[in-house]
């Protein structure tokens, strides 16, 4: 028991140190919630096969730190995570931004069930889990920022994101190495704001963040 508690404390401090290297200051309570999220994911994964990455250190890098890498880039109060899967990047972002509201969308029921369970268990009142295909959604109010990780090409993502956006909506796409070919084929109603290379501590993979702004033409979109 004592050893388990000491191990938990070390994991918590390690997470906070690595988040700091990303420019994210984690309160101890938020770090504890993030580790609890991984516990829940590991537990549900036994029955539902939600993630292929299950080694504790790898989960911290791939699920928590990678998700938090765009933390400083969010704009506005209404955030959508399109194709959230088991809640990434949406759940870690919602934990560190309790003042913003997050709508986590996925077309696969078992993943959305996990997201709803995790939000309930962690007491995240700023998270809504929505089971839907993005192309079927017509939100009453558009989102300020849409985040997405590992959801199609930039062209596919930009097309899916259109009904969730208003002029000025920011789309943040988590990518591997700089996706030059995809950038060359962007739909005209999304303007490229920039591509930032991300250093995710301990991940050992090339990561980049593509920022796009929705600028529909005069004919509308
Ligand atoms: N973002 C998560 C999951 C990536 S896998 C992560 O990085 O871990 C891609 C996810 O997008 C899958 O869970 C799939 O169900 C979802 N998805 C793909 N197309 C979608 C669509 N049109 N609408 C809603 N969800 C979609």
Image (spheres, rainbow, N blue to C red):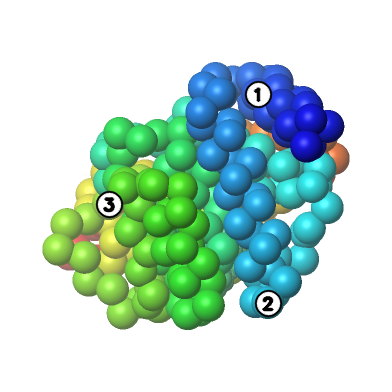
Query: In this figure, which residue is indicated by the disc labeled 3?
Result: 143
The residue shown at (59%, 20%) is 23
Q: Which element is circle 2 on?
A: helix
What mark, if any, has residue 16 been given in the picture? 1
The residue under label 2 is 47
In percent of the image, x 58 and y 34: which residue is there?
Answer: 32
User: Could you tell me residue 49's position as x and y percent?
Assistant: 69, 74
Helix, strand or loop at label 1? It is: helix
The front one of 210 and 54 is: 54
* Callout in the foreground (3, 2): 2
Q: CA distance from mark 3 to mark 1?
A: 29 Å
Q: Residues within 10 Å of mark 3 (few under 14, many from 20)?
A: many
The dot on residue 93 is none
In this rendering, is residue 95 above or below 53? above
Comparing marks 3 and 1, which lies closer to the viewer? 1
Residue closer to the observer: 89 or 162: 89
Residue 155 visible, this orientation: no
**The image quarter in which residue 116 lies:** bottom left
Viewport quadrant of the N terminus: top right
40 or 183: nearer the eye?
Answer: 40
């Amino acid at each position: 028991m004592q050893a388990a508690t000491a191990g938990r404390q070390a994991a918590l401090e390690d997470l906070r140190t690595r988040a700091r290297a990303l420019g994210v200051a984690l309160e101890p309570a938020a770090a504890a919630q993030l580790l609890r999220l991984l516990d829940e994911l590991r537990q549900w994964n036994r029955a539902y096969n939600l993630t292929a990455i299950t080694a504790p250190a790898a989960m911290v890098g791939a699920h928590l730190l990678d998700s938090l890498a765009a933390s400083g880039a969010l704009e506005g109060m209404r955030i959508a995570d399109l194709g959230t899967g088991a809640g990434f990047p949406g759940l870690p972002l919602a934990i560190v931004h309790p003042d913003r509201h997050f709508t986590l969308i996925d077309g696969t029921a078992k993943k959305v069930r996990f997201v709803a369970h995790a939000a309930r268990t962690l007491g995240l009142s700023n998270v809504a889990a929505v089971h839907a295909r993005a192309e079927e959604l017509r939100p009453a109010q558009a989102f300020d920022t849409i985040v997405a990780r590992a959801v199609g090409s930039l062209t596919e993502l930009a097309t899916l994101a259109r009904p969730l956006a208003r002029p000025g909506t920011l789309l943040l796409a988590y990518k591997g190495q700089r996706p030059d070919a995809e950038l060359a084929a962007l739909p005209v109603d999304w303007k490229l704001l920039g591509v930032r290379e991300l250093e995710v501590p301990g991940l050992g993979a090339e990561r980049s963040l593509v920022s796009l702004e929705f600028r529909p033409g005069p004919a509308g979109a």
